[in-house]
């Protein structure tokens, strides 16, 4: 917990205000999965069959990650958010009341990106940029501890892995 505290306080106080505003803008676009649904629509519309496969994989993985992180883990963990006095800016007032553990934003972002990448590496690389920014913003804003973000990333990777392997298993048994 002391490492979580130190990293949270450093991220909240050392990121310049202009960068923090950019991080917040990316996070806001990812709120309610808008960014990832928009990316999926663009991939499906412009990427042909590969784009449609990548978009579908990303959306399925994202839903799995959100169900696990927000529907299962958050209610079980019921971890409080980092204390407001650790965060030296006003973004701390705009954080949710739900459990801090794990980061559902990070879980969704990582799941989407990790599921897209095997099918369309260039699109996965493009999605990796806002994914990383979302993860940093969750700590910088005081919404999460770094361990919440790490757990969300692990859930996202698991959701992408499950999506990829479930589809392969399904296709193998398709008549």
Image (cartoon, rainbow, N blue to C red):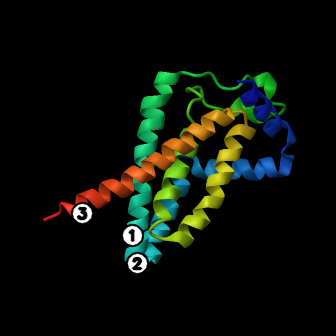
Where disc 2 sits, the SS reads helix
**Furthest residue in direction left, as rendered:** 175
Disc with the residue nearer the chain's start (3 vs 2) = 2
Kindly check if marks 3 and 2 are in contact, taking CB atoms under 8 A apart as contact. Answer: no
On the image, which quarter does residue 97 sit in? top right
SS at mark 3 in the image: helix
Identify the residue shown where x is 45% and y is 46%. Answer: 158
For mark 1, give the secondary structure: helix
Image point (62%, 21%), residue name? 80
| Mark nearer the N terminus (1 vs 3) | 1
The Cα atoms of the two marked residues, 3 and 2, are separated by: 20 Å
The percent coordinates of residue 57 (x first, y second) are 40, 60
Write down the residue under mark 3.
Answer: 171
- In the depicted structure, whether residue 6 falls above or below residue 135: above
Q: In the drawing, does residue 165 fall left or right of residue 94?
A: left
* Residue at which label 1 appears: 52
Position of residue 57 in the picture relative to residue 6 (left or right): left
Q: CA distance from mark 1 to mark 2?
A: 6 Å
Residue 40 coordinates in the image, percent (x, y): 47, 63
State the residue at coordinates (56%, 37%). Answer: 151
């Amino acid at each position: 917990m002391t490492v979580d505290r130190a990293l949270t306080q450093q991220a909240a106080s050392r990121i310049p205000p202009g960068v923090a505003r950019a991080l917040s803008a990316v996070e806001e676009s990812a709120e309610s999965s808008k960014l990832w649904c928009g990316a999926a629509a663009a991939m499906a519309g412009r990427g042909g069959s590969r784009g449609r496969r990548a978009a579908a994989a990303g959306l399925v993985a994202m839903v799995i990650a959100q169900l696990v992180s927000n529907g299962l883990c958050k209610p079980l963990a019921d971890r409080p958010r980092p204390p407001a006095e650790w965060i030296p800016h006003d973004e701390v007032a705009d954080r949710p009341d739900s459990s801090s553990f794990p980061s559902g934003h990070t879980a969704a972002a990582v799941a989407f990106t990790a599921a897209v990448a095997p099918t369309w590496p260039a699109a996965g690389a493009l999605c990796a940029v806002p994914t990383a920014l979302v993860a940093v913003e969750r700590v910088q804003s005081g919404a999460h501890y770094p361990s919440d973000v790490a757990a969300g990333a692990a859930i996202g990777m698991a959701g992408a892995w499950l999506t990829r392997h479930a589809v392969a298993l399904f296709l193998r048994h398709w008549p």
